[in-house]
Image (tube, grey):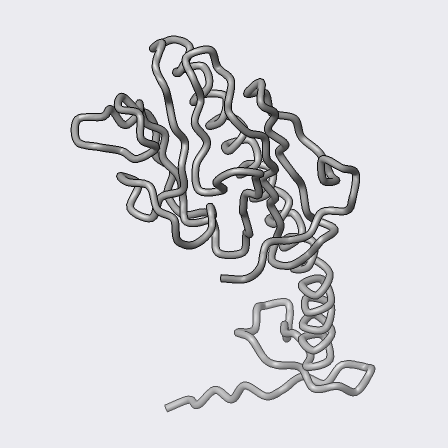
Amino acid sequence: MDVKHISACVPAHGHPIIPFPASASGCQGTSLMDVLMTLTIASLLLGIGIPGFQSYLASSQLVSSTNLLSGSLALARSEAVKRNRHVVICKSRDQQNCTTAGSWRQGWIIFEDRLPNRERDENEPLIFAKSRLPDALRLDYAAFRSSNFIAFRATGITKTNGTFTLCYHQDAHSARALILSKSGRVRFSRTRADGRPLRCPEEE
């Protein structure tokens, strides 16, 4: 019986070649040096690409969450006017009821406050519910009155003004704010209402 032997090819530069099945044209293969060079280049590209992707992801999460919150505030205001009733937006853990614990990052709800008592009671319609934000985001609300809810009257105005602050982790450079006025309107800002730099909410 004939026994075929596959031997490593040695090119002119002297590095052994990892053999592959030979073709009629001769020995084919990839040298160990070629493999190491490819791995080195790949690791460098990953090192450059991963931070860039993380930065893109952070920016994308911040933008989408800011837009969603702004849209939620606009929805609450418009529903108050349309229904001619008080409408409340409040932070919520279970997306059914308001809570006074934790930050707004855990989510929020919008409901028609028929009593009104700033709490969602039985048979009060739930208009919108938002679940928890991504873990990397920080969101909180500071106001002169309660920071747990915002109540819109049938005229679309509120009793107080305040500022929502969003950050990616504790990165103050990523901080952005939504400033709510008593008229019920919202504006975007990269500083506080008084012009001071934004501060990221504390870690939970």
Q: Nearer the viewer, residue 156 or 202?
A: 156
Residue found farthest to the left: 122
Give the side of residue 121 with respect to residue 4, left or right. left
Whole-percent x, y for residue 119 in the image:
30, 35
Quarter of the view holding residue 36: bottom right
Quadrant where the N terminus is found in the figure: bottom left
Q: Nearer the viewer, residue 178 or 57?
A: 178
Whole-percent x, y for residue 67 in the image:
55, 31
Give the side of residue 188 with respect to residue 107, left or right. right
> What residue sits 67% from the left and 63% below the top?
46
Whole-percent x, y for residue 145 in the image:
52, 38
* Residue 90 sits above or below residue 158 on the image: below
Task: State the count of labels.
Answer: 0
Q: Nearer the viewer, residue 41 or 65?
A: 65
> What residue sits 55% from the left and 20% below the top?
184
Residue found farthest to the right: 13
> What residue sits 72% from the left and 85% below the top?
10
* Residue 18 sits above or below residue 203 on the image: below
> What residue sits 48% from the left and 87% below the top?
4
